[in-house]
Amino acid sequence: MEHLNIYKGNLATFPTAVLELENLKSLQLPCHDFTAIPDDIDRLKNLETLYFDGGACGATPISYIPERIGNLQKLKNFSIGYSKKRLQLPLSFTTLQNLEYFGCYGCGIQELPKDIDKLKKLQHLTLLNMEDFRPFPESIFRLPALNDFTFYQYGKEVDPLLLAQKKQFDAWGAGIERYSFAINQN
């Protein structure tokens, strides 16, 4: 099996039997009740797409992304959305040398790694429905392959340094194919 999409099965725990699928390339597990991606997710060495999203069903309770996710060297697409908890990207995130797409949709991360520019193949970065996001690291402007950037933050309080960065982003965004940066303060 190369592709697995278990939609809306109300799984209380991550299905560990999935980790036995050595040839799995795409794993999509939206709309479930488990709280963590297992530490040994790196057993799926051929994984190219990893997708967790609670958007269509309400927020996912995932609150933990393991450090060993950085061992998934074939991972090209990683998307996580609508988490009830704040998520933090592990330090190993920037070792995903083949990552082309990262999407975070209301997933609660507050910042990107300072060395985000290590993701040399990252083409698409989408951060939507963010809340309490901190200023971006300067290394974001050194992502060599990035051609699609979308950022949308909402909330009552916005970090003034993030607001100040908007001008820098607008100037930088003129040079990439698709660009959107919006902050909505209530």
Image (cartoon, rainbow, N blue to C red):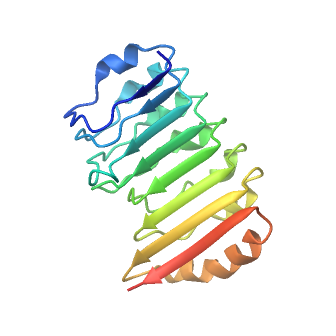
Query: Against 1, is 146 above or below?
Result: below
Examine the image and state in which quarter residue 37 appears.
top left
Query: Against 103, is 98 above or below?
Result: above
Say left or right for 66 vs 23: left
Query: Against 91, is 163 above or below?
Result: below
Residue 115 at least partly seen = no
Q: State the residue at coordinates (43%, 84%).
A: 185
- Which quadrant of the figure contains the C terminus? bottom left
Residue 82 at least partly seen = yes
Q: Residue 177 versus residue 46: which sits nearer the camera?
A: 177
Examine the image and state in which quarter residue 17 appears.
top left
Say left or right for 35 vs 20: left
Q: Position of residue 147 (x, y in %)?
A: 73, 56
Q: State the residue at coordinates (67%, 45%).
A: 119
Q: Residue 98 versus residue 105: which sits nearer the camera?
A: 105
Q: State the residue at coordinates (29%, 43%).
A: 31
Query: Against 64, is 139 above or below?
Result: below
Q: Position of residue 110 (x, y in %)?
A: 44, 62
Q: State the residue at coordinates (21%, 37%).
A: 10
Q: Position of residue 179 (x, y in %)?
A: 67, 67
